[in-house]
Amino acid sequence: MPLVHREVLRFVLKRKAIKSQSLVLTFDDGPSSRLTPAILKILDENNAKASFFLLGRNIQSREEIVRQLAKQGHEICSHGYGHVHYWKVWPWRSISDIKKGWQAINAALGKDKEDKYPFRPPYGRLNLVCLVYLLLHRVPIVYWSFDIGDTTAPAHRDKHKALEHLKKAAGAVTLAHDFERKREDTSKMILEVTASLLEQAKIKGMKVVTVSELLRTKRQVYQPRVAQ
């Protein structure tokens, strides 16, 4: 059932992106000390917003970056706390990981109220108990329509892969990762792809929106920043 639910959600997400001609940039596993700020710089230069699925364990000592995300108007989402594979642990362990991820975000933002953020399961895998828990709490479960391939080799070296996909597609929800990278060429690839996707969206007249904006089919036209 969770697998069927995932495929249905991915289909709906893809259809919404295509129908509304939208580009949604999503980043998993951050924040990182260097790559996340570099991505934010590119987004700011292009007057664009993205959705960041933060990993709770990576927030520690990087709380200021989380606050920067919120201050700049990007969407803060959760990827759990410890990047646990929910098919390989007991249900209560996976529920605890989800809650702990939300708590880490709330702590970084200084929130007393326990907000529940849109959730993307690690490895794209949910067990039945987690699925029911998230549905009962009306938490948006978010997947993607295109993986730019920055965590696989040698695909991570092909920076043209995502751009070619967007040239052919009318819309997409892209997946990239902004955790601390050991390979400088991979970090460079992510930054180049992000900038190229935004440029291609501008050329095609696509909207650049966050996940929640897409799910609401909010029609916010992409407005590139004009140099003064």
Image: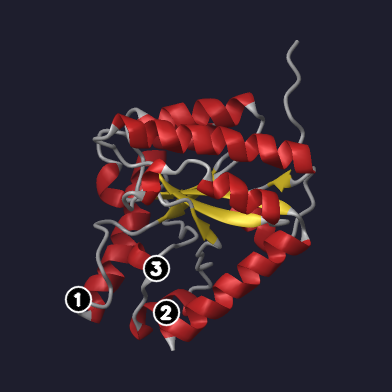
Residue 218 is situated, as x and y percent measured from the top left of the image, at 76, 55
Question: Which quadrant would the C terminus be assigned to in this image?
Answer: top right
User: Which colour assignment does the render follow?
Assistant: secondary structure
Judging by the rendered image, the residue that carries numbered circle 2 is 131
Using a 10 Å C-alpha cutoff, classify the residue at mark 2 as few (fewer than 14 neighbours), some (14 to 19) or many (20 or more).
some
Q: Is residue 209 above or below residue 32?
A: below
Judging by the rendered image, the residue that carries numbered circle 1 is 89
Instruction: Tell me what residue is drawn at x 25 percent, y 80 percent.
Output: 91
Question: Which quadrant would the N terminus be assigned to in this image?
Answer: bottom left
Q: Residue furthest bottom?
A: 1
Give me the disc on residue 195: none
Q: Nearer the viewer, residue 198 or 79?
A: 198
How many numbered discs? 3
Q: Nearer the viewer, residue 127 or 189?
A: 189
* Figure quadrant of residue 127: bottom left
* Drawn side of residue 201 relative to residue 105, left or right: right
For residue 100, say whether it is visible: yes
Residue 79 is situated, as x and y percent measured from the top left of the image, at 38, 57
* Figure quadrant of residue 170: bottom right
At label 2, the amino acid type is Leu
Q: Say which element carries label 3.
A: helix
- Rounded to the nearest angstrom, the CA distance separating label 1 from label 2 is 14 Å
At label 3, the amino acid type is Gly
Q: Is residue 21 above or below residue 202?
A: below
For residue 216, say whether it is visible: no
Q: Is residue 19 above or below residue 28?
A: below
Judging by the rendered image, the residue that carries numbered circle 3 is 124
